[in-house]
Image: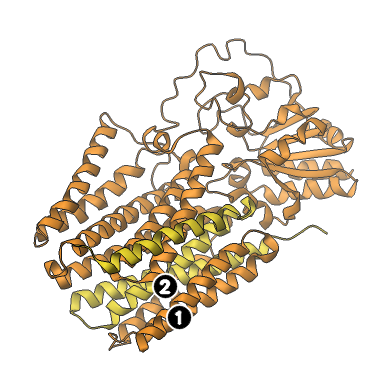
Amino acid sequence: MIDIGLIGDLYVFVLAGFLGYQVISRVSPLLHTPLMSATNAISGISLVGSLVVAGAGYNRVSTLMGFIAVTASTINVVGGFLITDRILKMFRAGK
Amino acid sequence: MRRDLLQLFYLASAILFVLGLRGLSHPRTARRGMFLAELGMLLAIIGSMLHHEIIDYRWIAAGLVLGTAIGVPLAMWIPMTAVPQRTALSHSFGALAAALIGISEYYRHGAALGSLRVGVIALEVMLGSLTFTGSLMAAGKLQGLIRGYPITYRGQNVSNLLLLAGMLALIPFLMFVPTSVTAFYTLVGLAFFFGVMLVLPIGAADMPVVIALLNSYAGLTDAAMGFMLDNKIQIITGSLDGSSGFILSILMCRAMNRSITNVLFGAFGKVEEQAAGALESKKPIRQVSIEEAAEILGTARSIVFVPGYGMAVAQAQHRVREVADVLKSKGVDVRYGIHAVAGRMPGHMNVLLAEANVPYDELYDMDQINSYFPETDVTVVVGANDVVNPAAKRLPGSPIYGMPILEVEKARVVIVCKRSLAAGFAGIDNELYYGDKTLMLFGDAKDTMIKLTAALKE
């Protein structure tokens, strides 16, 4: 029942969570909104899993679902990074 | 060989994502950081294109084009006040992708995956589905498509908990009976339904917490998708996102002195059992005219503006900045005090002020500004209500009791710019308006600021 792959994944998950906690705790409260849009953008990484399903031609249903998933993830990647930059551009120091 | 190369691409993008998020620790380094994250994303996508199972790029290309066509306008054309609903919508897109890929995995392999893998898929699909509908609900509430105030009914919490228990019971069931297609799709349906039910009782004022929480769910969904596909980059990214959303939810809850459970199940802002007798002695309020207010401001040396969501609704942030500009040209020290839950999402008020060209070094968070109020000549409250309500400190019966507030009344004079004496989102009257140092300046925020600028220039 023990799945070596899943255990390895669990290591990665837990350690990345700790790392995330450390990094995010240092994010300036000024930038909490762009932080959320930035995490939206990088959560578009679901694109990489979706690409395979859309392109592997397993069956018609999978391809369709993969296509929708690719579209939805791309919206997040493109839209997320664009709006993050749009927000960050507005933050200017005084004199 | 090709597979190893793909893993190296993923490793590089994971590092770039972490560096990118670290850049957000200061506005100076933030854009460079985001550039690194974009590079990381590009690497991950290019790497995935090399995946050995991909045989047909047509649907991929179509999805990329369509996604870009929707993503660009969604990012470039929406006003900054609508960023919260865009964020919620974005959570729902990510969750939709995850749920669909999970369903397609089960559809394709079914029970052949073995009980553990089916359990992972079930968990992933459950998280994805409930985050999808929950985020859509949140976006609808923020956009005003669904009524913003909490929708409650008898036995709501009990039925929601039963629903959750039902879903959680289906996962081990599917692990024992991985062939049960009925159980799988029942789980999907229940999760869609649960997402709606979860957000229904939550009011507009609690949206900052809910968005942060949904951000966390979206991250967990992504990580679960990584577990399902055995894809490390998704696990890392999901974990980073999950902890980001989690930290933000905690910060928001702390800023309201509430627990997550209370936000989720408390239906705040619906029925306020107003602490009776709180304001039995309605003291008279003191009103000022634009000219008088301008005179007070003109003779002050230090002024703190305390903006709230009301300012954003009135689109008055540019006008506030113009008042500040005139004052600054007269040598007045101008600052802005910003409460963590001002606005509709974490950090929202900072963005709205930055958009109005307020330099970020004039923006202070609660802890920084509270120690400055005693030496402040005038605080100007524009559209903020609950976050400056002294009842949070003095009135144990008040629904907002214990919430840390901006202690504006410690300044020498408080000018409250407000449309009328209506209560805030929490539906509570504000003692500040009847205070000895408080002067009420009634009128539309935008209008008032324009008139103030004119009066100050005279």
Residue drawn at x 51%, y 48% as measured from the top left: B248
Q: Can residue B76 be seen from the camera position used here?
A: no
Q: Position of residue A60 (x, y in %)?
A: 19, 78
Mark nearest the camera among 1 and 2 is 1
- Placement of B317 over or under B49, stated as above or below: above
Residue denoted by label 1:
B9
Q: Give x and y (percent) for residue B428.
A: 53, 25
Q: Residues within 10 Å of mark 1 (few under 14, many from 20)?
A: many
Other-residue count near label 2 (Cα within 10 Å), few / some / many at <14 / 14–19 / ≥20: many
Residue holding disc 2: A74
Nearest the eye: B175 or A6: A6
Question: Which is nearer the eye, B389 or A52?
Answer: A52
Please state the horizontal and vertical placement of residue B10, each as a whole percent of the image.
44, 76
Chain given the colour yellow: A
| Residue occupying the point 57% across, 45% down | B343
- What shade does chain B have? orange
| Three-letter amino acid code at the position of disc 1 | Phe
Q: Position of residue B6 (x, y in %)?
A: 40, 82
* Front position in the image: A38 or B86: A38
Picture quarter with the N terminus of chain A: bottom left
Of B66 and B260, which appears nearest the observer?
A: B260
